[in-house]
């Protein structure tokens, strides 16, 4: 009996479009990738390289200089070091929360589309209920009631963005599930798990990757807003939102202590959007080519 792996025509055409589009990845896309790589590297290796350079005792809100490239904060600590330290928390927590939200939302969407019936209805109604709760209000209630540890922030952000990821994935998966080659797979006896992972998932991977990037931006902004309100990451740990809150007094004088973390947030979110705009198939979808 032949054991050849079945590949649908849509899967083959999708892979081809990905290869062609990656060759045409624009300069703005590469710029976005470079910025993301910089912040990812800063989050992974920066704190170790700059260890011990954020000691107390310097001049408060000192201007930028050769000794302190981004000045100092409200306690006299080097702001460049603080921004790099904040990158680990901001990027790490946001990535973990987005990955959790996208994984749960996509898995539930695949299950709903492949199973249909009461499973689809139940999952959709439950997640629609979560969508009806304002995200900021839900986050404030969760953090105020259960604490603002890193784990709780990740879980809170993931719960908030699971419904959105589910809706996008389900709308794509339902369309794929209705195509002929999925019907053929079911006719030859393939189970729900095979249909979910082999027939539907590969064909929604591109749009879901773009959605992952957007969710990441949303989570970064949510965490920054919680920290700015004092309900996010707590001292002595830092993220970019808390750095803005701590050093807001320097804003009147144009101090880098508040401008630098703000620019860090802006640069990361803009870079992610630049990459999303250059993802394979984006231009074709905007022109209505499928």
Image: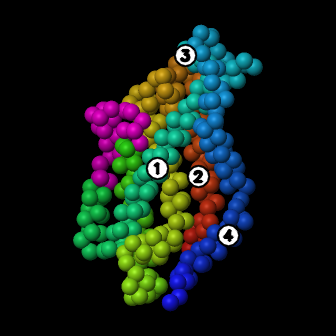
Up-down relation of residue 21 to residue 143 (above or below) = below
Q: Position of residue 77 (x, y in %)?
A: 60, 17
Mark number displayed over residue 98: 1
| Distance CA(mark 3)–CA(mark 2) | 32 Å
Up-down relation of residue 266 to residue 203 (above or below) = above
Q: Position of residue 162 (x, y in %)?
A: 38, 54
Tell me which residue sits at (61%, 30%) in the image: 47
Magenta region, main secondary structure:
helix
Mark 1 closeness class: few <14, some 14–19, many ≥20 residues within 10 Å: many
Q: Is residue 148 magenta?
A: yes
| Distance CA(mark 3)–CA(mark 1) | 32 Å
Q: Which residues are magenta?
A: 130-154
| Distance CA(mark 1)–CA(mark 2) | 15 Å
Upstream in the sequence, badge 1 or badge 4?
4
Q: Which residue is mark 4?
A: 19
Mark number displayed over residue 273: 2
Q: Which residue is mark 3?
A: 74
Residue nearest the observer in this picture, 24 or 96: 96
């Amino acid at each position: 009996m032949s054991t050849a792996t079945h590949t649908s025509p849509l899967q083959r055409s999708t892979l081809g479009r990905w290869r062609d589009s990656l060759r045409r990845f624009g300069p703005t896309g590469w710029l976005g990738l470079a910025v993301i790589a910089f912040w990812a590297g800063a989050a992974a290796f920066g704190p170790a390289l700059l260890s011990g350079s954020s000691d107390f005792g310097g001049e408060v809100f000192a201007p930028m200089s050769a000794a302190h490239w981004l000045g100092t904060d409200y306690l006299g600590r080097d702001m460049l070091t603080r921004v790099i330290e904040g990158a680990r928390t901001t990027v790490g927590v946001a990535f973990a929360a987005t990955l959790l939200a996208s994984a749960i939302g996509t898995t539930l969407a695949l299950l709903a589309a492949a199973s249909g019936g009461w499973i689809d209805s139940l999952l959709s109604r439950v997640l629609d209920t979560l969508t009806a709760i304002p995200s900021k209000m839900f986050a404030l209630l969760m953090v105020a009631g259960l604490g603002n540890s890193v784990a709780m922030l990740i879980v809170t952000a993931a719960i908030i963005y699971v419904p959105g990821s589910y809706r996008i994935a389900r709308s794509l998966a339902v369309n794929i599930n209705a195509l002929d080659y999925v019907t053929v797979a079911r006719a030859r006896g393939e189970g729900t798990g095979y249909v979910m992972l082999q027939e539907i998932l590969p064909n929604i991977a591109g749009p879901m990757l773009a959605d992952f990037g957007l969710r990441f931006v949303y989570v970064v902004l949510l965490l920054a807003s919680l920290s700015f309100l004092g309900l996010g990451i707590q001292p002595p740990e830092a993220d970019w939102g808390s750095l803005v809150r701590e050093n807001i007094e320097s804003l009147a004088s144009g101090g880098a202590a508040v401008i630098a973390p703000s620019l860090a947030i802006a640069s990361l979110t803009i870079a992610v959007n630049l990459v999303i705009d250059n993802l394979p198939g984006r231009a074709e979808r905007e022109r209505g080519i499928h």
